[in-house]
Amino acid sequence: MSAVDQVRVPQEPKFAGTIVKSVFFTPAGAIAVTVILLFAVIAIFAPWIAPHDPRAQSFLSVNAQPSSTYWLGTDQFGRDVLSRLIYGSRNSLIIGFLSPVFAALIGGTLGVLAGYFGGIIDRVVTRIIDMLMAFPELLLAILIAAALGGGFWNVVIVLTVAFTPGFARVARATTLSVKEEPYVEAAIAAGVRTPMIIVRHIVPNISAPIVVLLTLWTASAIRLEATLSFLGIGTQPPAASWGNIIREGLSNMFATSWPILTAGLAITIVVMAISIIGDTMRDALDPEIN
Amino acid sequence: MARYIFVRLLDSIPTIFLVFTLVFIALRILPGDPAIAVLGDYARPESIARFREQFGLNDPLWLQFLKFLKDMVTLNFGNSFTKGVPVMDLIKYNLPYTIELTIVAMLIGIAGGIPLGVWAAINRNKAPDVGFRTFSLIGYAIPDFYLGALLLIIFALNLGLFPITGAGSGFAERMHHIVLPATTLALLKIAFIGRLARTSLLEVLGKDFVRTARAKGAREPRVIYRHGLRNALMPLSTGLGLSVLSTLSGSVAVELVFNRPGLGRLLIDAISERDYPVIQAGIIIFASIVVVVNLLMEVVYALIDPRIRVK
Amino acid sequence: MTNLLEINDLCVEFGPAGHAIKVLHNVNLSIAHGEAVGLVGESGSGKSITSLSVLRLLSEPPGRITSGKIVFEGRNLLDLPRSDMPAIRGREIAMIFQEPMSSLNPVMTIGAQLSEAIMLHSEQNESQRKKRILELLKLVGIPEPEARLKQYPHEFSGGMRQRVMIAMSLACDPKLLIADEPTTALDVTIQAQVLDLLRQLRERVGMAVLLISHDLGVVADVCDRVVVMYAGHVVEDADIASLFDNPKHPYTRGLLSAVPSLSDTRERLYQIPGSVPAPGSVKRGCPFYDRCDLRKDICNNEMPPLHAHSSTHKAACWVTSSDAEAVSQSGVTT
């Protein structure tokens, strides 16, 4: 092992792990985490929890009111609302969690490379990021979804593209500031090779803001997927997603409003819980006047 | 100052160009033959050939792209595939409704949001502030279409106070129809703008010159408004620009919920019908509005901030 | 003759009611009419907090004045309702701060800000105010004042901005000017100019000044008397000459030794070993104990009281006080 590898570097105090742990210290944070875990359990164990097949239609019990068989009633196709809600959580949550992660990986890499190497790569990447970020996410998503159509993976692609610029920008900014830190300059001067520097020094230090952003944008992603599904360009029926449950429920509004009310409530609660977690983490990262 | 605006204007051109390129690529290169999409899977080969000839789909891509650019710049959007009428007519009909909705929602949002935000900032961490922050949290989480559907169900369906669909004709009726959709968007605006106002004001109130103002003997209201809010206007103006953009995108879903005509509605319907000329036009118009709003945002900021205005 | 300002046993705490930390311990300070007093100490000594307390500009959460009196012209300011303070600020007592860069409102013209200072406390009309403003700008040495009125703070240099701040503070002829580190953020040459200005103004206008600084040199330039603070306590209070010739507190001696001079032949600059204790960490005894080379056991157990070495020289130190007593008892004069 060369002397270079034995260089001890002081770690930044605001490490990703510390931030995550801080969430549990606030009552709101703890409740939010519990709620999310609850939903996660429901989504994972959907086949065991759902009382009926979400796609099973029954023309005998169309638009039924809540009863002991159908806890939340049925929709216009006679499908059990509760089961659709439970299965819907899978699509809504998985797409919501997956897309920001992809976006963080791609965007983060782009941002770090742009920030670290500078020069033409930086200028081009920044330009593209700025242009993309000038657009509201929804419009960007609509454009891409218009071309690709709906469906699970298409939506994942759409959302990933929508969030990548944001991650790239933050990764780049943090990389730029970390690059100026004395210990990085020392490492470079000592001859540590570039990939090593990036992995050992840059990445750990951008992990905290990336984690915060990841959380906050998971909330946005879930909302965005719901909106796309509502507009008809997201998750396609008969697959259930909280967004398209509301879409179908809207045209059926006069008969029963349970699908709309419950699906929307689910979205709101989940997004709120994730936002609370994200906000708590962000405050731990950068205690502001809030 | 004029130079600043000019430079910003020049800056927007590459963005518009990027949008044109993306739209072109999205609709031509990605899978799906428009001829089949419009004429159906069982269309005769001759019809398909004629369709492709008519819409220039057989020309080399670069030629198509140039024609496309020329058309876009001269606002020649062609005719709708599915409706047959000039796309421009469709836009002229629908765009005003969207603009109307956006403006009303923004006005209510600003009128409600800024005072609430200031009130919350002044009473930091006390009851009004906590209440507002909770409201704001919900406002950020609730999907716009859900809120719209809720309002629709409660006020139109069950209470019958408002019409369920459409936009109405004549001023009074249009105002009546716009209440629920605009309120939906406005509530979310109030949450966003209010939160922004609160944060900006709190940040400014922590600055040194505010301390100087107090040391001079200024009373609290003067400190908050003349010194605090006046300086908070700058970040607020940027936020307002973003808010306009988000209202615009929110209007798409709200138009669907309330069955209102509008640009968003037009676009979404066109997407499901694969009506390419309309999709193209819709996206480009939306994108242009976005670019213009961004530009305006920067200009307003430059006007308010003397550090930029007075070089 | 009564003093213009008397701070008696001022105690200030920071933090939530249960776990508050005391940051000012029985601070006593007085300023006579027209007198210039310097308040000296390192960061964390409590000098800024003391000065902010006079005008009650402390952020009330988390800060809190727990006991003591601040008597200005016979009135205890702490007894007044908070709403009465704006009438005093700027008019009877004015204050200027350390960062001229950020202490002026960036979106208001200089003219408007100066005008505001006058308007807040008088009924003068616009042209009267303008006349007064131009007078003030000339007084503080700003060239071409007419043209400057419509300019914004970012168009001024640091030194100029500080002069504007001074002009603003003088607008209503206050009896006392509190200057909190007015030159710290400025270059040395500008620093000299601003101090010059303060001295001239004092001579011309007869205003009392409380000059706060961590730099003894700055204070020596302008002040008649100096009060030295350490960790929230007043440790020495003396007229300028006595302080420099014959400091009675080990901390003051340390500060004076640390000032390099051209005739210095030492190889390394002197530095008081150790560092300032964190607020609330010293439970009893003299806060300087850990760094003091004269320390005795009693210093660790009990806080020394201010001992009057002469009518104009007080110091809070067991060792030097008992030395002084021993000396006076033995009949030898110093």
Image (cartoon, coloured by chain):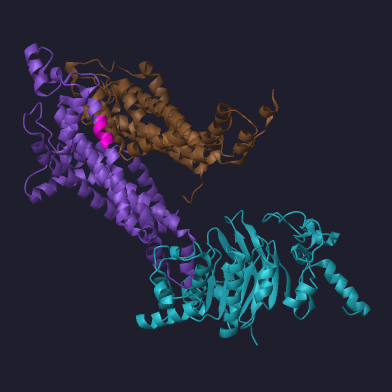
Figure check: C191 above or below A85: below
Residue appearing at x 13%, y 49% in the figure: B175
* Residue for point 34% across, 55% down: B302
Task: Please tell me which residue lies in front, C240 or B113.
Answer: C240
- Tell me what residue is drawn at x 20 percent, y 50 percent: B104
Residue B284 in the image: state x and y as whole percent. Answer: 21, 36
Q: Residue furthest bottom?
A: C1
Please tell me in which quadrant of the rendered image residue B289 appears.
top left
The chain letter of the brown chain reads: A
Up the image or down, C128 lies above or below B248; here it is below
- The overriding secondary structure of the stretch rendered in magenta is helix
Specify whether residue C32 is in view.
yes
Quarter holding the N terminus of chain A is: top right
Above/below status of A46 relative to C206: above
Q: In the rendered image, is residue A23 in sight? A: no
Q: Residue furthest right?
A: C330
Left or right: B147 with respect to C76? Answer: left
Q: Is residue B115 magenta?
A: no
Viewer-side residue, B34 vs A62: B34
Which picture quadrant has residue C5? bottom right
Describe residue B76's horizontal placement relative to residue C75 as left or right. left
Q: Is residue B98 above or below residue B26?
A: below
Q: Nearer the viewer, residue B171 or A10?
A: A10
Q: Position of residue A246 (x, y in %)?
A: 24, 30
Q: Which chain is purple?
A: B
Is residue B18 rendered magenta in the image? yes
Query: The chain coloured cyan carries which letter?
Result: C
Along the viewing direction, whichever of A126 and C75 lies nearer the viewer: A126
Whole-percent x, y for residue A289 in the image: 48, 51
The magenta-colored residue range is B17-22
Q: Is residue C48 left or right of residue A159?
A: right
* Left or right: where B116 falls relative to B48: right
